[in-house]
Amino acid sequence: MKRKLLNAKKTYPPQCAYCKRGKPSPDGKTVLCLKQGMMQPDDRCRSYVYDPLRRQPQTPLTVAQADPAEFEL
């Protein structure tokens, strides 16, 4: 069960870590859900509502700088 974002071609699988009703627990290993109680971050339930602000974007890749000596003839 995947839900599509409004402006993107990517779809993200439903997870409690991205749900509007869940909050991360103090230990950081579980999610506290208003409907289901303690859940694993990759679990999901029927009351899932996607919250785009909870998703952490991927870090961009860093490109190594080229040595100017490599371009000399």
Image (spheres, rainbow, N blue to C red):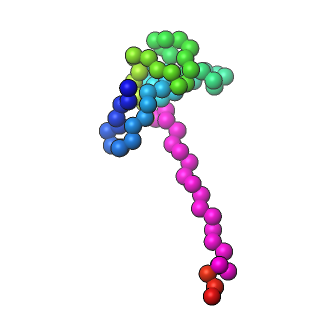
Q: Is residue 13 left or right of residue 28?
A: left
In the image, the segment drawn in magenta is 53-70
Residue closer to the observer: 19 or 9: 9
Give the image location of residue 28, x and y in percent. Answer: 63, 25
The quadrant of the picture occupied by the N terminus is top left
Residue drawn at x 53%, y 11% as measured from the top left: 37
With respect to residue 13, does 31 lie above or below? above
Residue drawn at x 66%, y 74% as measured from the top left: 67
Does residue 10 show up magenta in the picture? Answer: no
Does residue 63 show up magenta in the picture? Answer: yes
The quadrant of the picture occupied by the C terminus is bottom right
In the image, farthest residue toward the top? 36
The secondary structure that most of the magenta stretch takes on is: loop
Give the image location of residue 23, x and y in percent. Answer: 53, 22
Q: Residue 29 falls in which quadrant of the image?
A: top right
With respect to residue 17, does 10 lie above or below? below
Residue closer to the observer: 2 or 60: 2
Give the image location of residue 26, x and y in percent. Answer: 64, 22
In the image, farthest residue toward the bottom? 73
Q: Is residue 50 left or right of residue 59?
A: left
Residue drawn at x 38%, y 30% as measured from the top left: 2
Q: Residue 38 falls in which quadrant of the image?
A: top right
With respect to residue 56, does 48 lie above or below? above
